Image: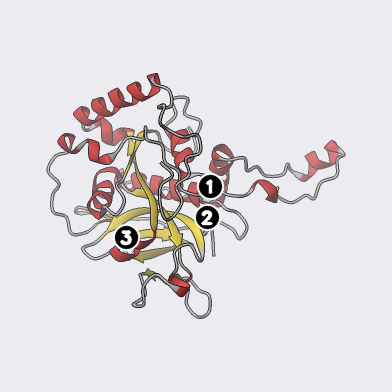
Amino acid sequence: MDALAGRLAAETDIRTLQMSQYPADFDESPEIPAHGLQPDGRFHLGDLRVDVSTGDPIGDVGYQNCVPAAMALLAQGWYAAAKEQFTPTLEDTLKIYEKVSPFHRDPAPAALIRSAQPHSGHREAHNDFGTSLLLALKLWVHQDQPLAGLLPEARSFLEIEPRNLDQLRESVLRFGGALVGLALPQSIKDGRGVLRDSWSVPGYGPVYDATPGSLSSHCVAITGYSRREFFCLSAGRVRRLSPEFLLTYVEEAYTVTPATVLDGNPALRDQILRDLEEIRRTDRPAGMPAFNHRWRGGNIM
């Protein structure tokens, strides 16, 4: 199974822009029963159908790179909307991983010999512990653009309200998708230990092998939906997520605003830029604790 772990505990920052702040800047949403990535592995964008290659799995056993993998797969949806092919590779995700976390790979063998220092020759496992989704997003939209050349330009990101499936659909329709942090249960694997294509809540509820987080803490890019399901790529295959599954196992969710989309909606772009400038001029609010992890069962704030 690839990259099915690596998302650190959900964090909260009360300065984060909320998707619910901008309803007046959106046009009335059209009733579109299905949009974006679909089970046939293509992006359905109105009358346009865009084939995308899933390529090789963009993770490896031991690499905790689900967050950068999800970021790259979200970018794949943006390229599809522009009728362009983009197939992220494991190398792409590891380069992003090195930018958004302390993770780094060992130098090449020749460099190891020159260093004349004891070294295993393998990757540095001690710093391969995943990354914070919120931190990775802050780096993606940073004014210095530390991820330039690895990911397309992004102007901002908006937090989706917990358990708001309408906002999740809106994020796919307007911005190409959402990055979702999941507390995955063991029940998404069958009796042989193979990932199921459909992820849902068992009839007996979120207990026993369906307990949230009993498998891993994961991040996916939801880039498609239908009337009854949401879709993402994970472990090289399209996975079908039921609404109840998302309501039960989502711990955090954000949509990222591509520059091209904002430029097509000047009112929304200008309002978001004004809000970002105000955030950058102010320091951490006095009531915001330094320790801001959001644990299951409540918010420390």
Q: Earlier in the sequence, mark 3 or mark 2?
A: 2
Residue 41 in view: no
Q: Mark 3 and mark 2 in contact? Answer it, CB < 8 Å.
A: no
Task: Indicate the position of residue 274 as horizontal and vertical percent values.
Answer: 28, 23
Q: Residue furthest top?
A: 281
Q: Earlier in the sequence, mark 1 or mark 3?
A: 1
- The residue tagged 1 is 93
Amino acid under label 3? Leu
Q: Secondary structure at mark 3?
A: helix
- The residue tagged 3 is 247
Task: Indicate the position of residue 202 as horizontal and vertical percent values.
Answer: 36, 75
Q: Mark 2 and mark 1 in contact? Answer it, CB < 8 Å.
A: yes
Question: Label 2: few (<14), some or many (≥20) within 10 Å?
Answer: many
Q: In this rendering, would 65 be left or right of 126?
A: left
Say which of 7 and 266 sits in front: 7
Of badges 1 and 3, nearer the viewer stands 3
From this view, report whether residue 203 is shown above or below residue 154. below
Q: In this rendering, would 96 be left or right of 137?
A: right
Q: Quadrant of the C terminus?
A: top left
Q: Mark 1 and mark 3 in contact? Answer it, CB < 8 Å.
A: no
- The residue tagged 2 is 58
Q: Secondary structure at mark 2?
A: loop
Q: Give me the residue at 24% from left, 61% from top.
A: 226
Q: Give me the residue at 46% from left, 51% from top.
A: 295
- Looking at the rendering, which quadrant does residue 283 occupy? top left
From this view, report whether residue 110 is shown above or below residue 201. above
Q: Give me the residue at 17% from left, 34% from top.
A: 25
Q: CA distance from mark 1 to mark 3?
A: 28 Å
Task: Indicate the position of residue 121 as horizontal and vertical percent values.
Answer: 78, 49
